[in-house]
Image: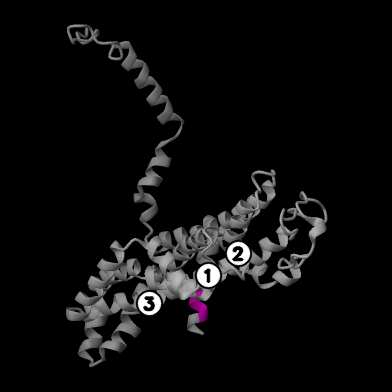
Amino acid sequence: MKRIKGMSLFVGRLWSHKQGKIGLIMVSVLILVAVFAPFIAPFNPYDVSERTTKGLAPSAKHWLGTTINTGQDIFSMLVYGTRVSLVVGVTSGVCIAIVGSILGVMAGYIGGFVDTLLMRIVDIMLVIPTLPLVIVLTNVLGRDFWIIILIFVALGWTGLARTIRSLVLVLKNSNYVKAAELAGASRWHIMIRHILPGTSHLVIMSTALSSAGIMVAEAGLSFLGLGDPTAISWGKMLADAQSGGALLFGAWWWILAPGLGIFLAVFSFMRLGIVMEEMANPRMKQTSGVYKLFRSLDSSYVEDVLNSMDDYQQIGVGRPLEKGGATHGTNLEA
């Protein structure tokens, strides 16, 4: 009951935030589309036998048109592609959060040889070029999307583990952790029951942001032909559009549909991740450089810039150099 109440309070705080409400609505819609895809899609997206409907423009029957080479309904492909993108993104994000948080807590709390070993592994993995390694691993291990999830998790936990470790170094010196140690609690009990919950806000935020990044990465792999060839994903739709000559024949709907799907999915998860980060650190919004930049770019700021440009020209600084190297207007009159 306590966990359910805490989760409801967390969702309520997200809903009370304007950006969080947008993110929750969009993610909920994506989840519903993925779950009820067989009922939403008007056609079978894997049916390539409709040769008479090739290259049709958007209409009342085919809302987003059909593909040029096989005649598949693009709207149905878009709906089913939501499943693969969400499964790969969310599953990878959750697994990365679990692995990164556990290893980060171990490195920060146990310290010594464990900390040194894990951090050296992190340092090595951070300098390895990711894309060439992913290409090699997909060719060796296979291109099933569960293999792709495993690769993303194996390469994506390092950044979170380093961040969690830094936080644990602070939490391990707190009073409630010291009290648990004096009471005779074991290391594993302290790490799981006392330290790990203290990093939950960072883990949840990282899950949302990692899910968004992995959706883009999966789309990129599928576009390069390294995704699961048996599953329809948004990246595979873009790859098929390129190979099928969508730009050449003007079939813009074939490119726009998966591109818009990728944008909306990443945007919704990024909204949730940013709002969670603001909830975890309320001062982030006020201290963010981007926030300060947009806050200062108002009408008065633009007027000040224009006025300064006029003053700058009046004193003659912008005039060309003379042969002797001196500029006109350097001897300013009072």
Magenta range is 4-8
Q: Is residue 97 left or right of residue 220?
A: left
Mark pair 3, 1: CA separation: 16 Å
Mark pair 1, 2: CA separation: 10 Å
Q: Main secondary structure of the magenta part?
A: helix
Residue holding disc 2: 233
Tell me which amino acid carries mark 1. Val
Between 334 and 309, the residue placed more toward the observer is: 309
Q: Is residue 196 left or right of residue 90?
A: left
Circle nearer the N terminus (3, 1): 1
Q: Is residue 216 left or right of residue 292?
A: right
In the rendered image, which quarter is residue 183 located in? Answer: bottom left
Residue that appears at 48% across and 72% down: 149
Can I make out residue 173 in this image?
A: no
Are circles 1 and 2 on residues that touch, CB within 8 Å?
A: yes
Circle 3 SS class: helix
Can you name the residue that lies furthest to the bottom here? 184
Residue holding disc 1: 88
Residue that appears at 34% across and 61% down: 129
Residue that appears at 29% across and 85% down: 190
Between 262 and 177, the residue placed more toward the observer is: 262
- Determine crowd level at label 2: few under 14, some 14-19, many 20+ residues with C-alpha closer than 10 A: many
Tell me which amino acid carries mark 2. Ser
Nearer to us of marks 1 and 2 is 2
Residue that appears at 27% across and 80% down: 106
Residue 128: x, y in percent? 31, 63
Q: Is residue 123 above or below residue 57?
A: below
